Image: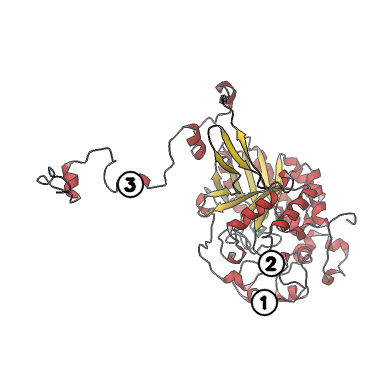
Amino acid sequence: MSNSPFPSKRAPAYQHIPDEKWNDWRWQLTHRLNTIEDFEALFPLTPSEKEALSSSGLFRVEVTPYFASLIDPNNPFDPIRRQVVPTAREMQSFTGMMEDSLAEDMHSPVPGLVHRYPDRVLMLITNQCATYCRYCTRGRLVGDPRQGFMRDFEAQIVYIRRTPQIRDVLISGGDPLTLSPDHLERVLSSLREIPHVEIIRIGSRVPVFLPQRVTTQLTELLEKYHPLWLNIHVNHPNEITAELAEACDRLSRAGIPLGNQSVLLAGVNDDPYLMRRLVQDLARIRVRPYYIYQCDLVEGAGHFRTPVSKGLEIIEALRGHTSGFTVPTYVVDAPGGGGKIPVMPNYVLSSSPDKVVLRNFEGYISAYSEPQDYQPPDKSLTDPYKPKETDLQEGVLGLLKGDYMNIKPEGFDALHMRGGEPHRLRMDAQKWKALGIGSEETEAKSPDA
Ligand code: SF4
């Protein structure tokens, strides 16, 4: 641990705890902070934090002693504190606020399973987390100690088994790595028995909140179910500690590719240079930055939202300025269930059949000459890869392939016919009459008469 370039911290209030206890994930979980008194043993709370912690009906509060130790006790604006200690601002509503902003419930064929994209599903298997984030998108589901998703697990597996287009299952929650090893193994082995499930992914903040949980026993369990990928969730460079680096090292050595998802949060990571440091530090612990999410329109998270332009500014500070593989995709998860929409600065300035005019991160502008004799590949090379069934979610790709000419919003045709006929069909005199336009006597006259 001492050779790590990253810090290892323990708040003064925990200095007397023996290492065996401090490094035991069960001790960390049972000593989580959730009251005013718990937090004030580490740092003085602001009036807004006290008000939130004394109110009822707030999203659950729990913080592991390990993660709370990363908070600077003298800075009320500390970015770690802001993520996990509630303030009264959570109780403020805002324009566009929704309980289920991603409409996940609408895309759930069985409880706890979200089938939004053609070839993959999101499987919610627990509603428990090691620590609760104040901006959680699934605040409506997560944190209730009386409920879980394991009861829906069999129905989820049946749905996946009888839906052959599902080749990728993302296990999330809550946090799947808070499950007992028996439960986790039951989920993973059930999925691995389904031949068309090619890859399993896990989304977890446990390595960040509770790195002690990433034991050799856990990594030995996970590596039995390859190919298995894992995305962690780090928002700020201060979350990268010697303990997180060690946990990621254990996961990487078990052959698990690691990615990171950040949420763009006001007052936490809404700065281009801070984000550059974050992605560079993630690369050092062998975690590839994957997504930066625009903060969702979720209840309680209004004060975390930034303009979308802030995300663009951050990507502008990354692309070209640091290693390409560390530049994540910035996405807006479309409210209402539209899924992730990538947003990026515009690098294509103009184009003609001969040239594409592009600009680089420095503003250098150049023209790329298009080939004049481009031939698409012979069908014999590409036909084997064609989907066997028509993919109803092809979208813009279907337009490019010529499968259809346009994509219309729901109700487009009816709206534009305005109760009538398609423009090219002649209306008979009776319909004109019904609309109060003309009559048998007036029809022969000029409209201007
Ligand atoms: S770890 Fe994930 S699911 Fe749990 S509270 Fe944080 S954002 Fe929500």
The amino acid on which the numbered mark 1 sits, given as a three-letter code, is Lys
* Percent coordinates x, y for residue 406 in the rendering: 43, 39
Q: Nearer the viewer, residue 298 or 273?
A: 273
Q: Nearer the viewer, residue 329 or 73?
A: 329
Spatial CA distance of label 2 from label 3 is 50 Å
In the rendered view, does 142 fall on the left or right side of 253? left
Q: Residues within 10 Å of mark 3 (few under 14, many from 20)?
A: few
| Numbered badge on residue 82 | 2
Spatial CA distance of label 2 from label 1 is 14 Å
Disc 2 vs disc 1: which is toward the camera? 2
Depicted 437 relative to depicted 371: above or below: below
- Helix, strand or loop for disc 1: helix
The amino acid on which the numbered mark 3 sits, given as a three-letter code, is His
In the rendered view, does 201 fall on the left or right side of 23? left
- Helix, strand or loop for disc 3: helix
Q: Which residue lies under the disc numbered 3?
A: 416
Depicted 252 relative to depicted 102: above or below: above
Asked whether disc 2 touches disc 3, contact meaning CB atoms under 8 Å apart, the reply is no
The amino acid on which the numbered mark 2 sits, given as a three-letter code, is Arg
Asked whether mark 1 and ligand 1 are closer than 8 Å, the reply comes as: no
* Percent coordinates x, y for residue 96 in the rendering: 50, 62
Q: Residue drawn at (79%, 50%), measured in percent from left and top? A: 248
Q: Which residue lies under the disc numbered 1?
A: 50
Disc 1 vs disc 3: which is toward the camera? 3
Spatial CA distance of label 1 from label 3 is 56 Å
Please indicate, yes or no, whether residue 394 appears anywhere in the rendered image: no
Q: Nearer the viewer, residue 444 or 114?
A: 444
Report how many numbered discs are placed on residues in the image: 3
In the rendered view, does 267 fall on the left or right side of 94? right
Q: Earlier in the sequence, mark 2 or mark 1?
A: 1
Q: Residues within 10 Å of mark 1 (few under 14, many from 20)?
A: many
